[in-house]
Amino acid sequence: MLALHCPNITLLGISTTHGNTDSQSTAINAARCLYAFGAPSGLRVYPGASKPLLLPPRYDAEIHGEDGLGGVEGLPDASDPALRNWFVDDDNGKPTRALEGMVHHIKATWQGGAGHKVCMISSGPMTNVALFVSIYPDLVDAVEEFVFMGGGVGMGNRSPVAEWNILCDPHAAQIVLNTPVKKTMIPLNVTHTAIVTKTIRASLLDPSYNGNPDNPPEAVSNLRHTLSTLLTFFADAYESTFGFNDGPPLHDAVTILYISQPELFKCTRFRVDVELIGEHTAGETVVDIWHYKPCDLTWGPKGRNCLVAQSVNVNGLFKLLLECVAKCDLCSPLNTLKT
């Protein structure tokens, strides 16, 4: 929704992968969301990797539900045949896969250097991105920046030290970190400060509401109801699992907000690597905050390779998010349906 409705972002396409749920469900979920958020008809979903590079796939139904969008109401049913319209078929009648889609759009945008570079944003395991930079090194120059939600500085959420997106495919994350292109990491330390409080939730449901947030208003549109139901499940999961009593954190969406308004963030450049084999620490993002490792100023395997977000202007973050909801409200097909 944010990538579609932030005024200074052009969304080229979506590739999906394993992670919160299986890759087939994430692809369908992306199509359901494109419909709900009023996406242009030309946008497409490109299904990607169904498993990590080396490890077996893992899913997190406890936090995200069996289908990855636990508790959501109002989206098209996953079996709706109209969702096929958000995919493009290859010559064999099968959906074009992530790598082909990524290469197509990057080449069309880059035009061999005569056009524009792209930003690649990852809000899940970075398997697709790692495959892209490995198979198409000649197109790496067309990428201005990799931005990913993942990792933590001295903390984790699905192990004592590892964040879920990195834990699902740590080898892919390391491949991307070694790529000689600017990278920005949005870690748990930042997303855990972006709490969807009861007050923000009330504003999401009804932007004119100024009553007691403990008694939230009715949603003034179907879109707002749908977004709220997704947050309800996530909030309950985070309260029971992690003890977040004030509301759930905003995780993956922060990557889009960073691309749109990087001035809201304070970032510092560090050397970042992923622990790949530790018995207790596999998947940990090792951020060299004291600069122990000798590094040059390149972005590759010998350099200080990653900007790490350290803080964010939370008020500015949610202001932009709610502005995007308001824009989406004007075009979402959900709002033409009966409640």
Image (spheres, helix red, strand yellow):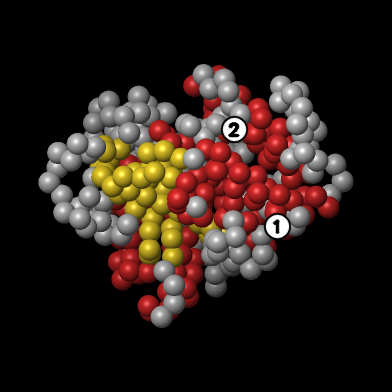
Q: Residue at x 37, y 69 (%)?
A: 142
Query: Where in the figure is residue 252, as x and y percent of width and height?
Result: 50, 43
Query: Where in the figure is residue 259, as x and y percent of width and height?
Result: 47, 54
Query: Where in the figure is residue 255, as x and y percent of width and height?
Result: 48, 48
Residue type for callout 1: Gly
Q: Looking at the image, is mark 1 or mark 2 nearer the viewer?
A: 2
Query: Where in the figure is residue 334, as x and y percent of width and height?
Result: 77, 50
Local crowd at mark 1 within 10 Å, few (<14), some, or many (≥20)? some
Which residue is label 1 attached to?
38
Q: Which is more N-terminal, label 2 or label 1? A: 1
Q: Residue at x 55, y 61 (%)?
A: 8
Distance of label 1 from label 2 (alpha carbons): 24 Å
Residue 223: image quadrant is top right
The C terminus sits in image quarter: top right
Q: Image height check: is 287 above or below 44?
A: above
Q: What's the mark number on residue 196?
A: 2
